[in-house]
Image (cartoon, helix red, strand yellow):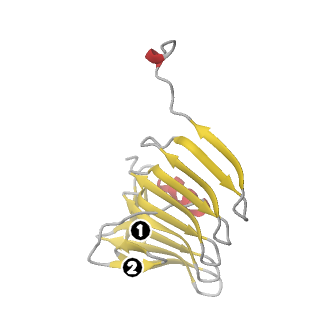
Amino acid sequence: MNGLRLEHRGARLLGKGAIGYWVVASLGAGCGDVPPAENQSQQQGLVLPGEPLVGAAWPDGSKKIEWHIEQGDTVGLRMYHSNGQVDREGALDHGARIGVWNAYHPNGNPWARHTYVEGIQTGAYQTWHPNGTPHITGQYDADGNKVGSWRFQDSTGAVVGEKRFDLPVSPDSVGKP
């Protein structure tokens, strides 16, 4: 931990890359199974632990960012589009994304689903077009590297590309059959 601490009305976002987290949270998202907590909030199907605290508002006064606070720490984040629909949401552990993170298009349809373990994106990755058609499907390994076959589809569902991300070759396996 680098000691960086962002505070908002007594709530802390701790940990390495806390500022980078806010930049990433504003640009992209992902989402996960969050253990049930005494205080939890549900929106778009994702349960977040802690008490919700509105951290920012759109010019019309509607909420833009909602932090979920538990024992003084930020344990969840939910951001909203200007039309009131959820933009992205997920849980945090000392500033690192954990579990499943979801993002949504302004029409409420899913946009992306990512899974994190201790801040590293792992497992299945999925994005969708605004009409609900799958867009990108792929997989990350435990170290956050793209692996296997990734598929790309247009908004009609037609496959427009596929890319293979093979695992790195071990130095001692070079030249061996």
Instruction: Point out the residue furthest to the top here.
Output: 175
Real-space Cα separation, disc 1 to disc 2, in angstroms: 10 Å
Name which residue lies at 60% across and 60% down: 127
Q: Amino acid at mark 1?
A: Gly
Percent position of residue 66, x then y: 48, 75
Name which residue lies at 40% across and 53% down: 15
Percent position of residue 40, x then y: 34, 77
Q: Amino acid at mark 2?
A: Ser
Percent position of residue 99, x then y: 40, 59
- Is 144 on the left or on the right of 24, as rendered? left
Depth order, front residue of 162/170: 162
Q: Nearer the viewer, mark 1 or mark 2?
A: 2
Depth order, front residue of 55/89: 89
Check disc 2 and report the residue beneath it.
41
Residue 15 drawn above or below residue 169: below
Tag 1–tag 2 contact (CB < 8 Å): yes
Displayed quadrant of residue 96: bottom left
Residue 41 drawn above or below residue 29: below
Q: Residues within 10 Å of mark 1 (few under 14, many from 20)?
A: many
Q: Which mark is residue 76?
A: 1
Residue 19 drawn above or below residue 172: below
Helix, strand or loop for disc 1: strand
